Amino acid sequence: MSLGQQLIDWRRELHRHPELSGQEVETTARLRQWLSAAGIAVLPYDIQTGVVAEIGSGNKRIALRADIDALPIEERSGVEFTSQNPGVMHACGHDVHTSVILGAALQLKARESSLPGRVRILFQPAEENFGGAKSLVRAGALHDVSAIFGMHNEPGLPVGSFATRGGPFYANVDRFVIRVTGKGAHAARPHEGSDAIVLASQLVTALQSVASRNVNTLDSVVLSVTRIEGGNTWNVLPESVELEGTLRTHRSEVQQNVKARVGEIAAGFASAFNAQIDITWYAGPTALVNDERWANFATSVARETGYETQHAELHMGGEDFAVYLQHIPGAFVSIGSASPFGLHHPAFNPDEALIEPAAHYFSQLAEKALQQI
């Protein structure tokens, strides 16, 4: 069997059996089996799911990372190898990422004796809930590693295309919950209460002015309210309403300024409406900031291996690869997957033709990066 077909077969097996963040037990077992069969050493890190392996010898180390978890989505892609786990789907392409890095590992293993150092392979769990990178860092997976590289498939790019950028790339991810507490009343006598629904509605509108009027137009920011919930019947003004949403930026100064402005607006509305507004922020990954040197290096290797390269636009999505880049330098890159449906869509279907060339790219990138250390 050719390498390309083997990687596609592995990708399809992973796709049939997706597992949610932190529950990747069968995925972990499969990865251990495939790596062991190839003679690749699995390192004994104290992690519940996920696998860390290593190839080569010597004191120099770089790392390659793939994420392995799936999403709580009912698949509607129509492929023959559709998910066998109801309500769970690889709708972000982590099965593809895993297959790519497996392929790179096999190629590196084939020339292990000539490698100028070690390549550590991180098959990371729980990217979708932003906990997996932290767990591997705590376990020591970056110990003695000088640089790290990872990828995400990009459905908006054709197969054979490559993009990255130095500096900020993916956005920070903050989640917020706002609880508006007024005073309930009969719907026919609203003057006896303090209407939390009216207040929450005006607050949603006011928050839209933050990005357009309180942030420099040259800075990237998204502030979105994505859920509003309050009341349970037609003739009662509820006492409370809950809002939920997200903040995305690429600079910590912008992030902190927006959070402060949201607090100021909420305080003003609470005073004006004689109500109480409580805001809780939940921090996700920080902005992903690529090392300029390694981003340029990754691009040059991509060009050498046949990719059509381009400078990536800023991405407003979040990616917990950012955690690794807070500890060591490296680069995160986009590989074209040409899906007619985007990431997190139930009909997402990346082109498997990307897998083998990407595996070759990462094996070359790893070896050439070791030569640069």
Image (spheres, rainbow, N blue to C red):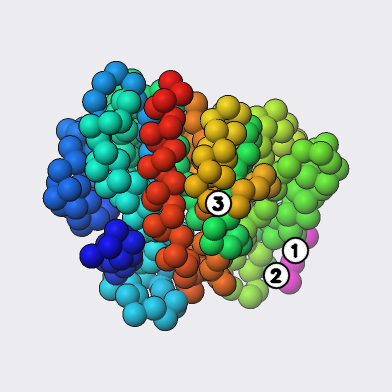
**Crowding at label 1, few (<14), some or many (≥20) Cα neighbours within 10 Å?**
some
Q: Quadrant of the N terminus?
A: bottom left
Pick whichever of labels 1 and 3 is earlier in the sequence: 1
- Reading the image, the residue beneath label 3 is 307
List the residue tagged with mark 2: 187
Q: CA distance from mark 3 to mark 2?
A: 63 Å
Q: Quadrant of residue 256?
A: top right
Residue 62 shown left or right of residue 255 in the figure = left
Say what secondary structure mark 3 lies in.
loop
* Residue 241 seen in this snapshot: no
Residue 47's place in the image compared with 306, above or below, is above
Q: Amino acid at mark 2?
A: Ala
Decide whether residue 8 is among the magenta residues: no
Q: Answer whether labels 2 and 1 touch (C-beta < 8 Å).
A: yes
Residue 44 rendering spot, x and y as whole percentages: 17, 33
Q: What is the span of residues highlighted in magenta in the rendered image?
A: 188-192
Magenta stretch mostly in which secondary structure? helix
Give the residue displayed 63% in from the left and 75% down from the top.
234
- Comes first in the chain, label 3 or label 2: 2
Q: Secondary structure at mark 2?
A: loop
Q: Residue at x 28, y 73 (%)?
A: 84
Q: Which residue is mark 1?
A: 190
Mark pair 1, 3: CA separation:
64 Å
Mark 2 surroundings: few (<14), some (14-19) or many (≥20) residues within 10 A = some
Question: In what element is the residue under mark 1?
Answer: helix
Whether residue 291 is situated above or below residue 319 in the rendered picture: above
Task: Indicate the position of residue 350 as horizontal and vertical percent values.
Answer: 47, 66
